[in-house]
Image (spheres, coloured by chain):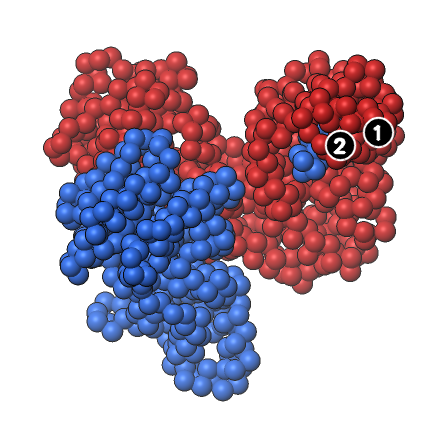
Amino acid sequence: MFDALSERFERLGTSLRSRGRLSEADLDEALFEVRSALLEADVELGVVRAFLDAVRERLSGEDLNQSLTPGQQVIKAVHEQLVEVLGGSALKVTYASKPPTVVLLAGLQGAGKTTAAAKLAAWFKQQGRQPYLIGADLQRPAAVEQLRVLARQIGVDVFSEASDPVEVARKGLAEAQRLGRDVVIVDTAGRLAIDEALMREVRAISDVTQPHYTFLVIDAVTGQDAVLTARAFHETLELSGIIVTKLDYDARGGAVLSARGVVGRPVVFASTGEKLADFDLFHPDRMASRILGMGDVLSLIEQAERAMDPSIVAESAGRMMSGTFTLDDFMAQLGQVRKMGSLGGIMKLMPGVTKEMRNAASNVDDSELNKIEAIVRSMTPRERRDPNLLDGSRRTRIAKGSGTSVNAVNQLLKQFTEMRKMMKQMSGGGMPNLPGGMGRMAGLAARASAQREQLPPGFEALGAGMASAPVNRPGGGGKNKKKKGGRVTPPKQR
Amino acid sequence: MTVVLIILVALVVLAAVFIIVRRRRRPANAIAPVVREAMPDLLVSEIAERPVLVEETSNLDQRLGASRSIFDRVRAITSVGALAQDQLDVVEEVLLRSDVGVTTTRAILEDLRTNGAPDGVAAAVRADLLDSLGADRSVTSSAEPGRVPVWLFVGVNGVGKTTTIGKLAQRHVNEGRSVVLAAGDTFRAAAAEQLQLWADRTGADIVRAAEGADPGSVVHDALGRAAARGADIVLADTAGRRANSTNLLDELAKIRRVADRAPGQVVETFMVLDATTGQNALSQAREFLAAAAVTGIVLTKLDGTARGGIVVAIERELGIPVKFVGVGEGVGDLIVFEPEAFVDSLLHA
């Protein structure tokens, strides 16, 4: 989406550049594109309108930044606005002075409440708390059973009995107090927003348990209906926040913005996968990038930082820049990358990667990596330092030694040589000849690292603007090729 | 192999770039952050009443409130020439709010623009939508002689696959067929228990295995049991899976192959879709179609406020018809899909 947007804007932008200021008509045209993008991301129509008004206000009258095209100016404003809306009035989870802290989960059927309840319990446990689960979903067959199974995996107790949900909640709370648990999570039955009987029931559960936090669990693939759901629950329960689930789907998740826009409560947690650990606090800037289809470099870098050993990476990065990168360094890097998780998962977070590549990557069995390692390990230390030594007979030996084919060895070496070439050029200061999307990535990386140091807000999106890089592209054309000037250092504007 | 290498290169370069960027950055400059006025918490304080294009015939009077006024602007207009922009805007709003999607909405607006609406805007939009819903939606419950027909159910998490199977089992039982359920969702905690309860309720036979077992083997066993007992049909559940994971889709393709091997024959593969789903449903349908040759959609949870308009886009673009719709929690609340009733409900919102 972001790609498409920035492309559309580029076309739009060339005619505007000379004027140095967005005219009303230009703005209309640009915002129309933004509107389509948001609607395709499932943001609700009313929320889209309000959002566009806010963006328009941000942009109108503002002098055009000289280093950005008008199109980028718009994207910058959109991104900033998204972050602001998604991140405004953030909620910090505090604990009740008189435990237990009660958390109530509500939402439509199939939104993922039961799983979210267990994940939330795991999260609290990680925070050093002693959570307790109450299974008050007596509606769906085997829902309590599901909760019990999940809870067993994380070592948390569940209270439930076959009676009335309100009664279960009341007894469960008393039980939690008796056991001295300090966090209680109440899972309720999924219900349609318009089902009055069930809404009354959840209201009654809420009255009985007096929750400190009431979270609406909403599915990232929800369409326009998200606002009606959120509004109905908010009116019944007075929500304190939103938990968004299924963020691992390829949906853009505009529903999050819709729900946020209509209840005015922050999104607190996000669930990003089937495993119980795939659950964390919500990051508005990442969601903004996602709605605009920009990939999730921040998560990627965070993951990299967590998994990689900086000294190893730095050492080989130094050699990378001096152009003396060896296969040993490659192996070291490979080991680091593998620590980050599956390639498919990593690729998903990377911006500017085509869908085909992403699909191909999720296809890749990580045992392929074993083969690569086997090939390199079958070389002598001298060969690893100087791949030029590798003639036909050595290659045959390596193929045999690693149980692969000469073809595979050749391929690896070819890629390695290209990689080395690329690195040499990079150390020259620019980002030349990177394969599709890589220049963009560099821009995002620059932006990301800037963002993490809390620079003024203007800067972050500047990096995002840079990512699509027509600013520094003298000819304007030649998509993704020869981004000679696309530097990775922050622009002067700072 | 090449792919792996390209990815690796990308990652290593990313790491390097990151380090270089960090190194080059000077210590943070002392620039005061730009302070902006806080955004209001609420973006939309009032949810606009959905405009309607077709009035509900039954409780007309109740519907004639606020929504009527918006609708009145366009309903009665018959136009042979171009429609005014504000009329088109209302049509657009109705369609977008029902999740029909930007592409389909544009196509319909384009049609209105060029052909006008001689019989009224509502009729024109209705006709356009019905045109998109023209695929064959007959349901097959019989297989070649000597083989057991299998209905396979696929879909993402939480759309109501298991419940749908329960309700369809009841339907078959009511029609005098003996049913075997295959609890192929071996991933979600307690999914088999949930299906067991449906088996008990409907009197269907069930084959289940331990959690984490191979779903293909469960389906295989179910086929064996069905063939041995001369059952009339097998309904096979599968675990909910996201549609953007090749591994999970490959697993699904495998389950389908197992189910289609004698004595089984897959006669219908249903993608179960939650009516609240937005534009992602299209990519779900595309992936599941490729992986499991989906033959029809079961649209669930239509009894809520969601309209499920995305199925129009799915049928337009991929030709997958909706065959059943879930309109309530009762066991009898799964009914055969009727395009006209559906389109009317889309338009009266």
The residue pinned by badge 1 equals: A392
Q: Secondary structure under badge 2?
A: helix
Residue A278 occupies quadrant:
top left
Residue A132 occupies quadrant:
top left
Q: Quadrant of the N terminus of chain B?
A: top right
Which chain did the image draw in red? Answer: A
Please tell me which of labels 1 and 2 falls first in the chain. 1
Residue A418 occupies quadrant:
top right
Q: Is residue B197 visible?
A: yes
Relative horizontal placement of residue B72, taking residue A379 as reference (left or right): left
Q: Which residue, as the protein is rendered here, is positioned at the far left?
A: A163
State how far apart marks 1 and 2 are (Cα): 9 Å
Mark 1 closeness class: few <14, some 14–19, many ≥20 residues within 10 Å: few
The residue pinned by badge 2 equals: A406
Dot 1: chain letter: A
Say what amino acid the circle numbered 1 marks: Gly
Mark 2 closeness class: few <14, some 14–19, many ≥20 residues within 10 Å: some
Q: Residue at 65% across / 53% down in the picture?
A: A4
Colour of chain B in the rendered structure image:
blue
Q: Is residue B90 above or below residue B243?
A: below
Q: Residue at 45% across / 61% down in the picture?
A: B314
Say what amino acid the circle numbered 2 marks: Val
Relative horizontal placement of residue B237, taking residue A441 as reference (left or right): left
Q: Are marks 1 and 2 in contact (CB under 8 Å)?
A: yes
Q: Secondary structure under badge 1?
A: helix
